[in-house]
Amino acid sequence: MALKVDYVVKETASNLRRNLTLTFASMVTIAIALTCVGASLLMKQGVARSNVRFHGDIQSIVYMNAKASEDQVLAVGRALDANPHVQSKTYLDHDAAFKEFQTLFFDQDAIKNSLTAAETPTSYKVKFRGDATAEVVGSVKDQFSRLPGVYSVIAPSDQVRQQEDSFAKFSAWSLGFAVIVGGTSLVLIVNSIRIAMFARRREIEVMKLVGATNWFIRIPFMAEGLVQGFLGSAVGIGIVALLRWKLLPTLVESGGPIWAGFHIETSDVRGTAIVLVLAGAVVGIIGSAVAATRFLDV
């Protein structure tokens, strides 16, 4: 039995009109599921961007001995310039270091008056590149701590490691949530379409008796699932976009280490929208195909 496009369109439209309640339920199910999936994907992208910014904001201080020679100070500066993980450095001579020391301990006279300008150690303020992981920060600290003339190196290795763990857990949670919700949506869609087909099981039996093939029967239902998937994904995309422009600024302003630097580009929303459209179409088609199979063996 040949399958014509106009027949598929007619049957699909008829099925959608005939089962408005179930069509709406399936569409809402897809929309809610894809909203959760899209939000999870955008959160993962935002966390990844926040992670890069966090690494780019990592700073360290290399304190020189107060009596370090000029050659030793210059050697440390050249080593910092040669290090691929160092983005920039700022050298504080005795006067600049003393001025900063006075500013830091302005309200503690005992400490503020404990050093003179000549006794205040010079230092390098170091800013790392965006790829500076906890291991990188720790290796740089170890490397420069051993150089001649260096008194100590202050580097937030433990804090970076803790923050990296937080980023990793948040990203894993977002991805896992997206996978779980996606699987759950597929089950819900299959069940909703099975209910619709159950109501038409007699009609399917008659079509089988007059010689209709399984695919002849199945394709209109798959087209119905495709339409539901597209409609549901469109609603999901709209909700995700609304959350991006309305809710996200409030979350970022609320503070917290992970939200610092959290940012989602418009291109991220567009890319996620494409994923949601494809996901909605695939879930709708697969859900309909699986649901239809149960009633084809008559």
Image: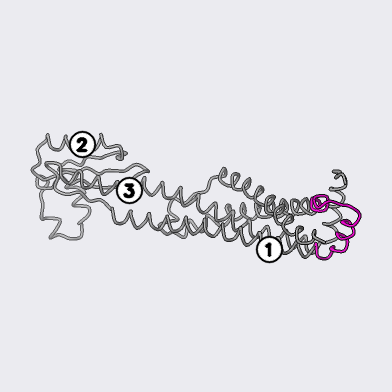
Q: CA distance from mark 3 to mark 1?
A: 46 Å
Q: Determine which of the numbered discs, if any, sits on residue 95 in the image.
A: none
Q: Which residue is mark 3?
A: 58
Q: Specify the quadrant that holds the C terminus.
A: bottom right
The residue segment tinted magenta is 197-220
Q: Determine which of the numbered discs, if any, sits on residue 188 in the image.
A: 1
Q: Quadrant of residue 188?
A: bottom right
Mark 2, other Cα within 10 Å: few <14 / some 14–19 / many ≥20:
some
Is label 3 in a helix, a strand or a loop?
loop
**What's under tag 3, amino acid-wise?**
Ile
**What's under tag 1, amino acid-wise?**
Leu
Horizontal side of residue 26 vs 141, given as left or right: right
Image location (x, y in percent) of residue 176: 52, 58
N-term-proximal mark, 3 vs 1: 3
N-term-proximal mark, 3 vs 2: 3
Front position among marks 1 and 2: 1
Residue shown at 66% from the left, 59% from the top? 186
Is label 1 in a helix, a strand or a loop?
helix
The answer to whether marks 3 and 1 mark residues whose Cβ atoms lie closer than 8 Å is no
N-term-proximal mark, 1 vs 2: 2
Q: Which one is nearer the viewer's eye here, 234 or 111?
A: 234
**What's under tag 2, amino acid-wise?**
Gly
Q: CA distance from mark 1 to mark 2?
A: 63 Å
Residue shown at 29% from the left, 56% from the top? 158
The reply to whether the magenta stretch includes residue 97 is: no
Q: Determine which of the numbered discs, if any, sits on residue 77 in the image.
A: 2
Q: Which one is nearer the viewer's eye here, 165 or 289?
A: 289
Residue shown at 10% from the left, 41% from the top? 68
